[in-house]
Amino acid sequence: MAQAQASKFKNPVVNWIDSRLPIFTMLDHEYNHYPMPRNVNYLWAFGAIAGIMLVIMIATGLFLAMQYSSHTSLAFDSVERIMRDVNYGWLMRYVHANGASMFFIAVYIHMFRGLYYGSYKAPREILWILGVIIFLVMMGTAFMGYVLPWGQMSFWGATVITNLFSAFPIVGDPIVTLLWGGFSVDNPTLNRFFALHFLLPFVLLGLVILHTAALHVCGSNNPLGIDAKGPQDTVPFNPYVTIKDGFAVVIFLIIYAIFVFFMPNYMGHPDNYIPANPLVTPAHIVPEWYFLPFYAMLRAIPDKLGGVLAMFGSIALLAFLPWLDRSKVRSCKFRPVYRQFFWILAIDALVLGYAGAMPAEGAWLIIARIGTFYYFFHFLVLLPVLGKLERPRPLPTSIAESVLKGGGGIAAGAHAKPMEKA
């Protein structure tokens, strides 16, 4: 028979639980003594920020769901009632609505950090692929949530995006009918979207736990993109990284609060304060800002099926980066040629986002097509070719050497004695 294992915690209750279910030992190991590269910068805090945003979104969404009515004749009015009659309903709604945008900001920074420092390369392929899946689930959840207020942009956005599946031959029309629950966007559609919007965040939470577990198996990357050679290259997660992450979280939440309290509708669309009307089409249908680069790709291609494939392909393509990038060097800090193209990609994403917000005509359509071409050219051509042709700069022999040579502040002194012994 298995015996309860001794636990090291002083608190008798914690000790009793941990000796039978060692959850506190696991947390102590993973979030207290877990070794982190000593040179990680504030960009590494956006993973923690994204996790906190997910918790905020689930908590506020739960309270909003208690007051929301998922019926086409009641949905818009129930949102207005939340804003006017429910105690602190306005706060819950503004925190939730702006939280979606802040969540995507944190995730986009997290993704571009991974692209810049090569965090998708071996041995972190599964970690990266899980991140891409998280991004896809986030997009689906956000889209369904945008439909729930049942304003003009909600209704017509749902109509346009769900209609895209009809571009697929044979299976397209049945998929659209299944999504709609009928032959147009109506009450069954709203009910399904509400149910899925409530469910998917918990799926997202499970994926984030897997993502974190995969990270702790292979370890965190760092700005140098080289592996830790020993204890002299790392610091304990607590207090060094917790303090840094905590400071970054506070700054991020302050910016978040500025939007919530002073400009809560800045990142929304005014047409969504008009009740949904199937007989009146808005002059210009646009999704939320975080979908705009992909929306620009969709509209850039004249063929409907081609546009849909380009939009979904642009996201699916990210999952293959570990194999498309043939360079043995991870970080752009040591790849001077590719670093220039990385910043061109970042500018291209911003330009595509702006083009997606503009009417699909004239110069904006041409700009969207050029931007779409470069996006795929960057990942499918430039990345593999430069990986073979580029001569990277010499890598430092260890993280500790680079940190101590450049002055590493508090972190540099954390393992001074092991470094001296080395």
Image (cartoon, rainbow, N blue to C red):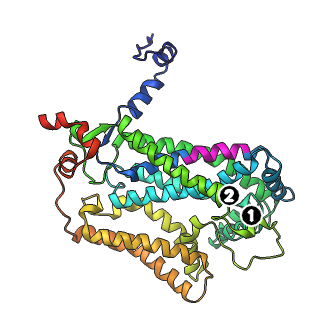
Residue 367 lies in magenta, yes or no?
no
* Residue sitting nearer the eye, 21 or 180: 21
In this view, which residue lies farthest toward the right? 73
| Mark before the other along the chain sequence, 1 or 2 | 2
Specify few, some or many for label 2: CA neighbours under 10 Å numbering under 14, 14-19, or 20 or more.
Answer: many
Three-letter amino acid code at disc 1? Thr
Q: Under tag 2, what secondary structure?
A: helix
Residue pointed to by mark 2: 144
Provide the residue span drawn in magenta. 53-63
- Rendered residue at 41%/40% (across/down): 243
Residue pointed to by mark 1: 177
* Residue sitting nearer the eye, 407 or 58: 407
Provide residue 107's location: percent of width, then percent of height.
49, 55
In this view, which residue lies farthest toward the bottom? 362
Residue 338 falls in image quadrant: bottom left
Q: Distance between the residues labelled 1 and 2?
A: 16 Å
Three-letter amino acid code at disc 2? Met
Provide residue 212's location: percent of width, then percent of height.
44, 42
Residue 57 lies in magenta, yes or no?
yes
- In the image, residue 6 above or below residue 406: above
Q: Under tag 1, what secondary structure?
A: helix
- Rendered residue at 59%/67% (across/down): 289
Specify few, some or many for label 1: CA neighbours under 10 Å numbering under 14, 14-19, or 20 or more.
Answer: some
- Rendered residue at 41%/34% (across/down): 31
